[in-house]
Amino acid sequence: MESSFAIPVNKRFSLWRTVFSHGWCSLAPYSVDKEHQALVRLLALGHGKNILVRLEEHQTHGIKVSVSSSRQLRPSEKNDILHQLKVCLRLDEDLEEFYREARRHAGFRWVFDAGAGRLLRAPTVFEDVVKMICTTNCSWALTEIMVNNLCRWFGESFDDAGYTFPSPAAIAGSTEKFLRTKIKSGYRSPYLLELSRRVAEGELDIESWRSSNLSTPELFEEVRSVKGVGPYAAGNILKLLGRYDYLGLDSWCRGKFLCIVWQMERSFFLA
């Protein structure tokens, strides 16, 4: 069944800028149709129903959402899709204060003009955390491999469109050996397994982080308490929670910074 609807958006919202805000758009179950500037994703709804959505920017109607499903959507399912997409695109996040600050600096006024500033995220915190763990101490190519393998082995298929992101329970039922050999997650395997089991058993409620009343430093420490999540991963996870106080600096960023500092010092001494 094919259906479609539109999502009204703020005039300063750019779908394409949000899609390419960072690398999440290239990690399954997201994919990008660059030719038509569309974001595609499999979504898991309640009662085991999966659907495929395609998002395109419309000049007058905001975001056009095209849905492929096995049967006609109920009103509650359409509301579920709308909620998940708003979460992914951060449509309810107020960026006015950020835009006011950006406009004060000539080099950043383009951010306001382009409707940039939102970071694409997953429908669930669990997916964001798993993916962030899969970015640690490895190449982006390996991150893509690990996430693709997680979806293929533990997700649910929809026609020939791929696989949904797995539930915590699906990963929790696996073993460390399987994760190491089939997912290629290496040292991250026990961390992914423990996280999934804690979430599946209700011991860890990470979905509540998006609405947490904790101060940002307190929330940072709570995120850091998850095994496999270091300062870099925690800082980036906080950004996906709407907290922007920490810099998620990986080894590449630190290396670039040190290189710039070295070049400045060298220029100073040679002057």
Image: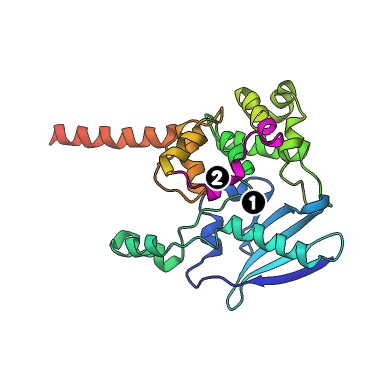
Among all residues in the image, which is located at the extreme right?
71
Q: Which residues are magenta?
A: 196-214
Residue 209 disc label: 2
What secondary structure is marked by label 1? loop
Question: What's the residue type where badge 1 is placed?
Answer: Pro
Query: What residue is shown at x 68% (from left), y 28% (from top)?
Result: 193
Question: Badge 2 local density, few (<14 within 10 Å), some, or many (20+)?
Answer: some
Q: Is residue 140 magenta?
A: no
Q: CA distance from mark 2 to mark 1?
A: 13 Å
Using residue 149 as the reference point, say whether residue 87 is left or right of it.
left
> Does residue 201 sit above or below 245 in this rendering?
above
Q: Which residue is mark 1?
A: 123
Query: Where residue 116 sits in the image (x, y, percent)?
Result: 46, 61
The one of 18 and 78 positioned closer to us in this rendering: 78
Can residue 180 be seen? Answer: yes
> Does residue 192 sit above or below 207 in this rendering?
above
